Image (cartoon, helix red, strand yellow):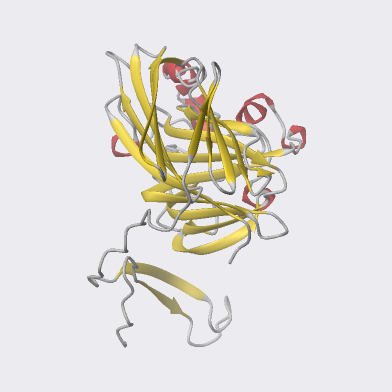
Amino acid sequence: FKKPNLKPGAEYLIKVKFELAEETLWAKQGYLLAWDQFKLPFKTRPAPKPSLEGIPDLSVDESEEAFTVKGASFQITVDKDSGSIESFVYQEKELVSRPLAPNFWRAPTDNDNGNRMPERQSVWRTAGPGRVVSNIDIQQSDPKKVRIQVDCLLPAGKSDLSIVYTIYGSGEIVVESSFKPGMDLPNLPRFGMQMGIPGEFNTITWYGRGPHESYWDRKTGAAVGIYSGSVEEQIHPYIRPQEVGNKTDVRWVTLTNEDGAGLRVTGLPLLSISVWPFSMSDLERAEHTFELNRRNFVTLNIDFKQMGVGGDNSWGARPHLEYTLPAKPYKYSFRITPFADEN
């Protein structure tokens, strides 16, 4: 094994496979028997931090309803009432079909229904949609950077949520979400954010576990790598529609259209990601797969985590405690980067 030339900020993994050396009655030569993957203990220098030098200045417009941040090639609108990014126009193309908003719920799985999760944890279903913005503040300490902080009160036990958008003259947005629960609350199904993007951005590429779906307690069979496919290909046709298509340990994900334009979400450091050609409410309402009709938008879930799937008894058993999200403070962040083509 030859040590590679180490790049700043890079990680290096090795995958070991065991295959049949000869053909047998039950499998051909080369049949995969087992594999494992290891992160190599190389010490690499940190990647250089993004510099403000050379990027365009920003301007801010404020109305009664919203803040609008404008750069040389983009415009971002944050609604004051909801605290959400409701529009992101980059090089004259709208990237947001449904606002970026906090999400604490998931469409119940068969196991969730079997252990009565929808009743036990129902308070989190409306925690995101029912939030009330208690304060919104904007600061521009540098001509090339704008910081918008949104403080929310959640109906779930009077919990607090703070979201900070740091917008750069390059068009990048760093999103930081901090959660502080109230008293006597059940576990969270998930902690994350959800948005809709135009349906033309139908190709997903990610660096994380794949190629199939994986969950917190169902991921060691999915190797870390770079995978790509259509949004529709990420949907497993469960007999009854439910939570589907999650990717764990995601370093970055891109969604692109036929021209190669799109957006990239980078975890700081890791995320759980999923994309659907329909909404979460569609997943909850449908009783059969054929009832799920493609929408004109793609739902993008950008999560810190969601709880495990559970089901050790084949149906209904709760996730192990180590794969749950107790009601305690959580914080995570990610970067959104728009681009005009894949280069």
Quadrant of the rendered structure where residue 312 is?
Answer: top left
Q: Residue at x 29, y 84 (%)?
A: 3
Q: Residue at x 59, y 61 (%)?
A: 228
Q: Nearer the viewer, residue 139 or 17?
A: 139
- In this rendering, does residue 186 appear at all? no
Image position of 168 with respect to 131: above or below = below
Q: Could you tell whether 182 is left or right of 266 in the image?
A: left
> Which quarter of the rendering shows the N terminus?
bottom left
Percent from the top left, x then y, of residue 321?
Answer: 29, 34
Quadrant of the rendered structure where residue 10 is?
Answer: bottom left
Percent from the top left, x then y, of residue 141?
Answer: 33, 37
Percent from the top left, x then y, of residue 229?
Answer: 64, 58
- In this rendering, does residue 15 appear at all? yes
Q: Nearer the viewer, residue 8 or 2?
A: 8
Quadrant of the rendered structure where residue 65 is?
Answer: top right
Q: Residue at x 28, y 71 (%)?
A: 40
Q: Nearer the viewer, residue 276 or 66?
A: 66
